[in-house]
Amino acid sequence: MDGGGSAASITNRRDQGWPLPANEITLGDVTVTRVREYYGPVDMTPETFFPESTPRTWEEHSSWLEPHFVDPGTRIVNSAIQTWLLRSEGRIIVVDTGVGNHKERPYAPVWSRLDTGFLDNLAAAGVRPEDVDVVVNTHLHVDHVGWNTFLDGRSWVPTFPNATYLIAKADFDFWNPANEHRSVLGRGNQNVFEDSVAPVHEAGLTTLWEGSYTIDANLRLDLAPGHTPGSSVLTLASGTDRAVFVGDLLHNPVQIVEPDANSCFCEDPAGARATRRRILGWAADHRALVFPAHLGGAGAAEVARAGNGFAVKDWAPFADISEDAR
Ligand SMILES: [Zn+2]
């Protein structure tokens, strides 16, 4: 993290025969493990996914945006669905739970009826579902709450029976169908609350928090609204190391160099831009690793201020997720 690395560092290191490291790094007293659910195309072009991004930016940065973050052949955006697994103060914390298996998503066909080996990947990281102490849903979109539950016969039941599920009350209320809020997603989040949020709430496993929430001496949750009303970020501060798990504050590193470009899924466009700039600015000033939910490639990055935006200063030392396919 100290080097003046550039966005091209992944390729450089691979060209030099860089041995692929384990998918785990240590920050202070906390270990961070990357657990993959999916990596690949998500059926959207850059123009559809990020309507405010400029074609020039994609072109200018194509040498490192391709192929990890956009496929140069098809011009379709590549995304990862991954869980960040933290071990802190003897407890296991899971940040975001992906899409899940067997879920009916009539308005999001790319995420409908998946059957992935996510739990096997979790087991490969040394974790059984019953070992998980805390689940963090950075927000309640379809691709962040899926493994909150699994299909047991005809019922959706908590995947992590011994965990406390931390959910921002603002998102819980916004996505609760009983409140009939309108969303930019239209019906894109249909069934999600019912099959992935309500079952853990009804099982008494949720803590609905407001403002901020301290998990332990290393980890704290804060509201970071914009993408959704209750979007949140998890800040890690341990020893001299800093990191911030930002959920969908950004989906693609094009939003680091062009921080005003929202995804088409942001509920409050102005709020999303302001929050993205605020959190990236904090990360740059504190040399904090930024862990979005969906980056392919190395998955996380240190950022620096650059002109009116930011730049990737160095990538986290995770293996390229496209080479981690199971
Ligand atoms: Zn997402």
Image (cartoon, grey):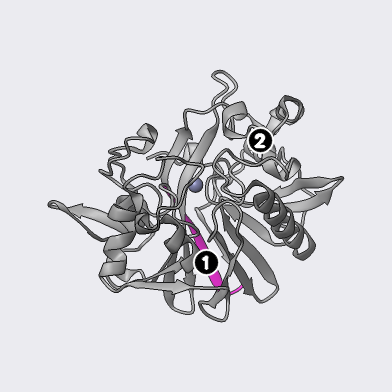
- Amino acid carrying label 2: it is Thr
- Amino acid carrying label 1: it is Thr
Alpha carbons under labels 1 and 2: distance apart: 25 Å
Where disc 1 sits, the SS reads strand
Q: Is residue 319 above or below residue 97?
A: above
How many numbered marks does the figure carry? 2
- Image coordinates of residue 260 in percent, x first then y, are 73, 43
Which residue has dot 1 on it? 31
Mark 2 burial class by Cα count in 10 Å: few <14, some 14-19, many 20+: some
Viewed as shown, does residue 73 lie left or right of 307? Answer: left
Q: Quadrant of the N terminus?
A: bottom right
Where disc 2 sits, the SS reads helix
Mark 2 close to ligand 1, CB under 8 Å: no
Q: Is residue 41 above or below residue 292?
A: above
Does the image show residue 31? yes
- Image coordinates of residue 322 in percent, x first then y, are 49, 37
Q: Residue furthest top?
A: 73
Foreground residue among 274 and 175:
175
**Would you say residue 215 sits in the magenta stretch?**
no
Q: Quadrant of the C terminus?
A: top left
- Image coordinates of residue 35 in percent, x first then y, are 43, 52
Q: Earlier in the sequence, mark 1 or mark 2?
A: 2
Viewed as shown, does residue 116 lie left or right of 301? Answer: left
**Most prominent secondary structure in the magenta stretch?**
strand
Foreground residue among 50 and 60:
50
**Would you say residue 30 sits in the magenta stretch?**
yes
Q: Magenta region: which residues?
A: 27-36
Viewed as shown, does residue 148 lie left or right of 212? Answer: left
Which residue has dot 2 on it? 11
Identify the residue at image location x=47%, y=28%.
43
Quadrant in the picture for residue 47: top right
Identify the residue at image location x=28%, y=45%.
101
